[in-house]
Image (cartoon, rainbow, N blue to C red):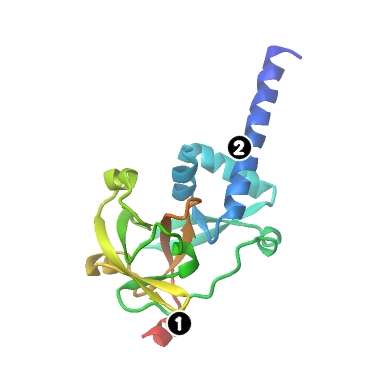
Amino acid sequence: MNLQETVKETRKKQAEQTDEALLVFIRERPGALSLYQIAQEMDWSIGRVQKSVERLSKNGLISYKRAFLGGRSLKLIVPTRTQEKHSQQPAVDLPTPFERTITIPTELVSSDCWSDHAFLYALDRLTLGISADRERRWQESSLLEAKVQLRRVEKTTIVELPENVYHFYLLNVNDYDISTFAKGDKILVTVGGVRSAEKSNRES
């Protein structure tokens, strides 16, 4: 095998290892994931995540879920239906959120690190981060940091949002997806997908 073939084979193996690691990560996380979250938690570049996602999508192992906000398109990553059926994470049916709040399953914030308050970060136009404690990396790059209250209601936890955050992200008309980090001390809320008029009327 000449040098060119050796380099090609090495890159192929590296790509396979990357794809395997990313697929395991996606299958173990509840909800749809943004490229931003994957890159943050895996400490990868966006480019590396994007290339791996494209390969996995081409092989039918993952698919895209599109969300739109303010004319911008957001790609969320989900396992294929076959993988979703075998996922250990059950589907969660969230109740209607209260005004100026978001609602998350209590099981995602049930560890000892969570109390009756948390720290909210506006990470970008479509992503909110919620952390049990101050998160230095988010603090340095976020548009806003705010201490927020948590209220437990049955099997859900209500996060009370500042009014300006609630309206900036158009949460009165937009749905959101929730995913958690491996350590269980942080939540990402990805906003997108305008609710239908019928659903919005039921919630008003």
Q: Residue 115: which quarter of the image? A: bottom left
Residues packed near mark 1 inside 10 Å, few (<14), some (14 to 19) or many (20 plus):
few
Q: Position of residue 57 (x, y in %)?
A: 63, 49
Identify the disc placed on residue 18. 2
Q: Residue 171: which quarter of the image? A: bottom left
First reached walking from the N terminus: tag 2 or tag 1: 2
Q: Quadrant of the N terminus?
A: top right
Q: Quadrant of the C terminus?
A: bottom left
Q: Is residue 49 left or right of residue 173?
A: right
Q: Residue at x 69, y 64 (%)?
A: 85
Q: Is residue 109 above or below residue 92?
A: above
Q: Is residue 107 left or right of residue 59?
A: left
- Residue situated furthest right in the rendering: 1
What distance separates the C-alpha of mark 2 from that of mark 1? 40 Å
Secondary structure type for disc 2? helix
Q: Residue at x 35, y 79 (%)?
A: 98
Q: Residue 88: which quarter of the image? A: bottom right
Q: Is residue 118 left or right of residue 185?
A: left
Q: Position of residue 12 (x, y in %)?
A: 67, 30
Q: Position of residue 184 (x, y in %)?
A: 47, 55
Q: Which residue is mark 1?
A: 199
Q: Position of residue 182 (x, y in %)?
A: 51, 51
Residues packed near mark 2 inside 10 Å, few (<14), some (14 to 19) or many (20 plus):
some
Q: Nearer the viewer, mark 2 or mark 1?
A: 2
Q: Residue at x 29, y 49 (%)?
A: 142
Tell me which amino acid carries mark 1. Lys
